[in-house]
Amino acid sequence: QVQLVVSGGGLVQAGGSLTLSCAASGTTLSQNTLTWYRQAPGKPREMVAGMTSGGATNYPYFVKGRFTISRDNAKNTMYLQMNSLKPEDTAVYYCNTRPNDSARTYWGQGTQVTVSS
């Protein structure tokens, strides 16, 4: 059974930083595609960071240079480092993983990130 447990959300002032963690069990993140998404009220869920099993990363323009996705293979945990946060980054953030040999994806529970101006 795959479980993803997210932690690290909270309230931060504009310009501040937060790091989200997503600890996995039942799957090996180093063999998976990893993605962080967010969803703000009234808006569709959007991808904010992705990493392949080979370590290649990609980011949409609106977070590029501010957000960094990473993983710790020993801890089987993925991270989202968020710097220079803006009020428009306020959303519920989710981690997602898909094993390379499967079409199935798994989601962590959301964590609220609120950026005050």
Image: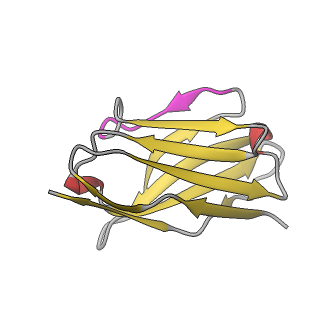
What residue occupies the far left of the structure in this picture?
A: 117
The boundaries of the magenta stretch are 55-62
* Position of residue 97 measured from the top left corner of the image (x, y, whole percent): 67, 52
* Position of residue 27 measured from the top left corner of the image (x, y, whole percent): 82, 53
Looking at the image, residue 30 sits to the left or right of residue 22; the answer is right
What residue occupies the far bottom of the structure in this picture?
A: 42
Looking at the image, residue 80 sits to the left or right of residue 5; the answer is left
* Position of residue 28 measured from the top left corner of the image (x, y, whole percent): 81, 46
Query: What kind of secondary structure does the magenta stretch mostly adopt?
Result: loop
Is 30 covered by the magenta stretch? no
Name the quadrant containing residue 79.
top right
Q: Is residue 26 above or below residue 85?
A: below
Looking at the image, residue 16 sits to the left or right of residue 79; the answer is left
Regarding residue 45, the answer to whether it shows in the image is: no
Looking at the image, residue 79 sits to the left or right of residue 92; the answer is right
Name the foreground residue: 11 vs 88. Answer: 11
- Quadrant that contains the N terminus: bottom right
Regarding residue 75, the answer to whether it shows in the image is: yes
- Please report the residue visible at 79 percent of the width from the left and 38 percent of the height from the top: 74
- Please report the residue visible at 69 percent of the width from the left and 47 percent of the height from the top: 77
Name the foreground residue: 78 vs 99. Answer: 78
Name the quadrant containing residue 61.
top left
